[in-house]
Image (spheres, helix red, strand yellow):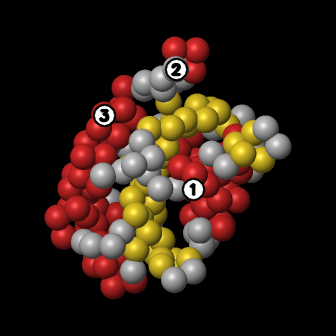
Amino acid sequence: MKASVTKSANKHVFSKIFFDYHRIIEVAEIIHNDFMDYELSVLGKTSKLFPAQGKDTIGNGKTIQNHVGELTALGSGFQSFFNPEIGNIFIIGPLSSIFLNDLEGKSLGALSMGPYGILRGLGISQEIAKAHLSALEKGGYLMIIRGFDDQLNDLKDLLEPEMVK
């Protein structure tokens, strides 16, 4: 699967699916050490939510949040929502507010076409957005990075060998 770098307002968006959450943590470390002025968000499918207990604790999602949060000082923490097309989804990072934005009592991400519309609104192509959501439904993790073009192209070049697989 190809990653994409697309324009979005003054910054650009780089998105990539990972099926190994350890790789997300490695990439987050690379971004933290080698790139500046970025916003990193991660989405992943979860098996269950625990809203009655006042927490959303999901194994790999919480692990990602702990490691990525340390590197990026993500203030928005670990959030989750239910989407009828995909299931339970966690989100970490600054894009949380978009996915969790209340629209008449439901979060935007909880609407059937909500995640697709958000990805398209970020400038991700129709084909890539559909592929990302399909991979998310199958248990993949979607990393979305917003930053300036030169840094995102450098990051894409760095990840290119694994994208050819």
Q: Residue 103: x, y in percent?
A: 78, 47
Q: Is residue 109 above or below residue 130?
A: above
Q: List the residue tagged with mark 2.
A: 54
Q: Which sits in the foreground, 13 or 94?
A: 94
In this picture, residue 112 sits left or right of residue 116: right
Location of the N terminus (image quadrant): bottom left
C-alpha distance separating marks 1 and 3? 25 Å
Q: Residue furthest front?
A: 75
Q: Which of pointers 2 and 3 lies earlier in the amino acid sequence? A: 2
- Residue located 36% across and 32% down the image: 62
Q: Which of pointers 1 and 3 lies earlier in the amino acid sequence? A: 3
Circle 3 crowding by C-alpha within 10 Å: few under 14, some 14–19, many from 20: some
Q: Residue 46, can we see it?
A: yes
Q: Is residue 55 above or below residue 38?
A: above
- Residue located 27% across and 73% down the image: 36
Q: List the residue tagged with mark 1.
A: 131
**Tags 1 and 2 touching, CB below 8 Å:** no
Of circles 1 and 3, the one toward us is: 3
Name the element at disc 3.
helix
Q: Which sits in the foreground, 101 or 32?
A: 101
Kind of residue sitting beneath label 3:
Thr
- Residue located 67% across and 56% down the image: 116
Q: Residue 98: x, y in percent?
A: 61, 55
Of circles 1 and 2, the one toward us is: 2
Circle 2 crowding by C-alpha within 10 Å: few under 14, some 14–19, many from 20: few
Kind of residue sitting beneath label 2:
Gly
Of circles 2 and 3, the one toward us is: 2
Q: List the residue tagged with mark 3.
A: 63
